[in-house]
């Protein structure tokens, strides 16, 4: 049996109308007051969510920007670290130092293919600036003592952004004023130091070497050349390694001359 129109269930608004009004102000029911409070909380919560999303999005954009810039920089950078007041050293790609800088970077992103180190050009230490190609990375630069006192140059050569285990087969040759040393990672089979074109092993998991050039006179210039290649005669030089990537960075700082003991 259908209910009559007058027998229909009361609506929420009818129920709300039966609630006693507030002592002052407009006659707003408790039901409507609760709804307004919920709406206010919802709006506040929505604003908080929107602000949080905006902050997270901004941070992601900043991180992406840094990653994009980093990915587009060359395979090697060198910078002056922790410049002390009493020392002043500068970098340049040419020994005339017509332009001076606290940071230098290779212009190319090297995509290395394997090569035997014995095939490297004999004059690879005699070409200024970035002279890399598809077979090796090569970069020559100069560091000058600009102050009026003698100093020592301390340097650290490190690497990062390694993919596909490229560091397993890579060789790093560092020239300091014409004298070079070849570096390589220890053998992956646990056999210790590499036997082919390796004078010293990497200092640690991310550092090729540390070094010191002592007794650098005022206005004296020290020439550095870094050469990086994939050693084709290394047992770890496989196809997957060739498709990898690696970046190098060098930091140079000036310090007091280290006193040496004779005899």
Image: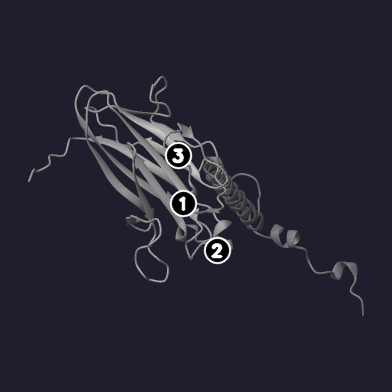
Q: Where residue 117 is drawn, which disc sits there? A: 1
Label 2, on which residue? 238
Most extreme residue toward the top is 98
Secondary structure, mark 3, is: loop
Front-lying residue, 166 or 194: 194
At which x and y percent is residue 136? 51, 46
Disc 1 and disc 3 in contact, CB within 8 angstroms: no
Identify the image quadrant of the N terminus.
Answer: bottom right
Q: Is residue 161 visible?
A: no
At which x and y percent is residue 54? 58, 45
Q: CA distance from mark 1 to mark 2?
A: 16 Å
Q: Where residue 124 is drawn, which disc sits there? A: 3
Secondary structure, mark 2, is: loop
At which x and y percent is residue 5? 89, 67
Q: Earlier in the sequence, mark 3 or mark 2?
A: 3
Q: Residue at x 62, y 49 (%)?
A: 43
Secondary structure, mark 1, is: helix
Front-lying residue, 79 or 94: 94
Above or below, comparing residue 39 to residue 138 in the picture:
below
Front-lying residue, 56 or 105: 105
Q: CA distance from mark 3 to mark 2?
A: 26 Å
Most extreme residue toward the left is 263
Q: Residue at x 32, y 38 (%)?
A: 252
Q: Give the number of the mark in front: 3 or 2.
A: 3
Most extreme residue toward the bottom is 1
Above or below, comparing residue 22 to residue 219 in the picture:
below
Q: Residue at x 69, y 59 (%)?
A: 16
Q: Give the number of the mark in front: 1 or 2.
A: 1
Residue 13's image quarter? bottom right
């Amino acid at each position: 049996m259908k209910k009559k129109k007058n027998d229909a269930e009361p609506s929420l608004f009818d129920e709300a109308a039966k609630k006693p009004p507030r002592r002052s102000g407009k006659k707003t029911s408790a039901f409507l007051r609760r709804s307004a409070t919920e709406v206010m909380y919802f709006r506040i919560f929505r604003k908080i969510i929107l602000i949080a999303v905006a902050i997270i999005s901004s941070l992601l954009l900043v991180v992406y920007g840094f990653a994009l810039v980093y990915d587009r920089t060359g395979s090697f950078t060198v910078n002056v670290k922790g410049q002390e007041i009493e020392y002043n050293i500068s970098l340049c790609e040419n020994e005339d130092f017509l332009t001076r800088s606290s940071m230098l970077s290779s212009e190319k992103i090297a995509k290395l293919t394997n090569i035997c180190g014995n095939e490297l050009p004999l004059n690879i230490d005699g070409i200024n600036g970035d002279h890399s190609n598809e077979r090796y990375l090569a970069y020559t630069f100069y560091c000058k003592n600009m102050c009026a006192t003698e100093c020592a140059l301390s340097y650290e050569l490190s690497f990062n952004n390694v993919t596909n285990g490229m560091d397993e087969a890579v060789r790093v040759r560092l020239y300091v004023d014409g004298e070079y040393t070849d570096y390589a990672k220890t053998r992956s089979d646990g056999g210790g130091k590499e036997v082919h074109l390796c004078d010293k092993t990497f200092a640690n998991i991310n550092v090729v070497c540390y070094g010191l050039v002592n007794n650098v006179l005022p206005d004296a210039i020290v020439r550095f050349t870094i050469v990086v290649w994939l050693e084709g005669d290394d047992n770890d030089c496989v196809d997957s390694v060739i498709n990898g990537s690696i970046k190098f960075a060098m930091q140079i700082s000036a310090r007091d001359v280290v006193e040496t003991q004779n005899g």
